[in-house]
């Protein structure tokens, strides 16, 4: 079963495609040529595809990698947009900004952004509150917050939602769990297992309900939680298996095993502002 690529794999594939040779790509990325070669072979093994043909000491892109290239460029366009948004955020020097976010975004994207902002704009006072997914829209609409961050949102004429990224559904398991030997998992693998999971009233719980229903599997909740970091802590303690979004787990992978969930489910992340006259501080991160 194919494994997922890391952002570093994608960076190397892009560099080789754009540079045309391993030597030039290695120089651009400031790594060794053997390191580039090893990373490409690892990427091909993970994908189960041949990305470059090696003939007479040169690399030639295959139709498969050329088909992936537009998606690779889109990833880098999104990264550039995030960097530009961060630069705009840094230019906000003072005043107040009220923000609401779901916990997984607050503890990752926002924590890093606000950490940088505290040094660059010490006169800007930020109030950050964590709320449920559906409460983000209501808080921004009602004027209780100028800026909100949430998962997939319903259309609401009172707010403007701007996509800022994506995250995937993954499974986390205690180390040594029998299912940890599988390359990826689906709802049928988790049928009737006692799960650490979320209520169907939460966004991720609704996603899991749908995934299990479509597979004809039963989602049996052994421990119900409301936040991903709690699910991670409980899985690390051996309380069960959990399906979570991958946004928050990168900094917590010390007590559990992560496996891709199939079929892949992508959740979009949105920044939300009021449609009418948002403040400069609220709009700066979205430019």
Image (cartoon, rainbow, N blue to C red):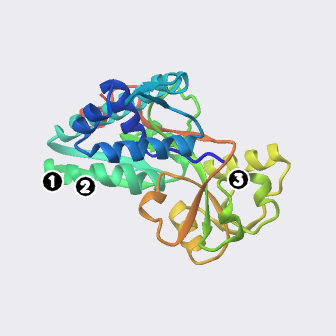
Residue 144 in view here: no
Residue 225 vs residue 217, the one in the foreground = 217
Q: Is residue 85 above or below residue 104?
A: above
- The image shows residue 31 at horizontal and vertical percentages of 26, 45
**Residue holding disc 1:** 119
Dot 3: element: loop
> In the rendered structure, are the residues bearing label 2 and label 1 in contact, judged by CB atoms less than 8 Å apart?
yes
Which quarter shows the C terminus? top left
Dot 1: element: helix
Q: Based on the displayed image, in which of its 4 quarters is residue 143 positioned? A: top left
Residue at x 46% of width, y 39% of height? 142
Earlier-in-chain disc, 3 versus 1: 1
Q: Is residue 22 left or right of residue 161?
A: left
**Residue holding disc 2:** 115
- The image shows residue 206 at horizontal and vertical percentages of 69, 48
> In the rendered structure, are the residues bearing label 3 and label 1 in contact, judged by CB atoms less than 8 Å apart?
no
Q: Marks 3/1: CA distance?
A: 39 Å
Label 2: few (<14), some (14–19) or many (≥20) C-alpha neighbours in 10 Å = few
Q: Is residue 245 left or right of residue 11?
A: right
Residue 206 in view here: yes
- The image shows residue 250 at horizontal and vertical percentages of 44, 58
Dot 2: element: helix
**Residue holding disc 3:** 200
Residue at x 27% of width, y 51% of height? 114
Q: Based on the displayed image, in which of its 4 quarters is residue 21 positioned? A: top left
Label 3: few (<14), some (14–19) or many (≥20) C-alpha neighbours in 10 Å = few
Q: Marks 2/1: CA distance?
A: 7 Å
- The image shows residue 196 at horizontal and vertical percentages of 66, 66
Earlier-in-chain disc, 3 versus 2: 2
Q: Marks 3/2: CA distance?
A: 33 Å
> In the rendered structure, are the residues bearing label 3 and label 2 in contact, judged by CB atoms less than 8 Å apart?
no
Q: Is residue 70 left or right of residue 30?
A: right
């Amino acid at each position: 079963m194919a494994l997922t690529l890391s952002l570093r794999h994608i960076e190397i594939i892009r560099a080789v495609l754009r540079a045309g040779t391993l030597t030039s790509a290695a120089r651009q990325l400031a790594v060794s040529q053997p390191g580039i070669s090893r990373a490409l072979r690892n990427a091909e093994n993970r994908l189960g595809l041949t990305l470059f043909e090696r003939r007479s000491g040169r690399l030639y892109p295959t139709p498969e990698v050329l088909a992936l290239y537009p998606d690779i460029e889109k990833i880098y366009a999104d990264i550039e947009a995030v960097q530009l948004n961060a630069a705009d955020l840094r230019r906000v020097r003072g005043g107040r900004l009220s923000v609401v976010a779901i916990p997984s975004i607050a503890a990752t994207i926002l924590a890093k952004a606000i950490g940088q902002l505290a040094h660059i704009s010490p006169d800007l006072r930020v109030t950050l509150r964590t709320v449920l997914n559906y409460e983000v829209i209501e808080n921004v609409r009602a004027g209780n917050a100028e800026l909100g961050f949430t998962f997939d949102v319903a259309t609401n004429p009172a707010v403007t939602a701007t996509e800022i990224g994506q995250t995937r559904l993954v499974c986390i398991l205690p180390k040594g769990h029998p299912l940890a030997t599988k390359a990826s998992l689906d709802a049928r693998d988790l049928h009737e297992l006692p799960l650490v999971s979320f209520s169907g009233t939460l966004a991720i719980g609704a996603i899991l309900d749908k995934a299990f229903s479509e597979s004809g599997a039963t989602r049996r909740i052994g421990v119900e939680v409301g936040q991903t970091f709690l699910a991670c802590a409980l899985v690390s303690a051996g309380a069960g298996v959990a399906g979570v979004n991958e946004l928050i787990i990168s900094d917590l992978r010390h007590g559990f095993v992560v496996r891709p969930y199939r079929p892949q489910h992508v959740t979009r992340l949105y920044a939300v502002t009021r449609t009418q006259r948002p403040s400069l501080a609220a709009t700066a991160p979205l430019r």
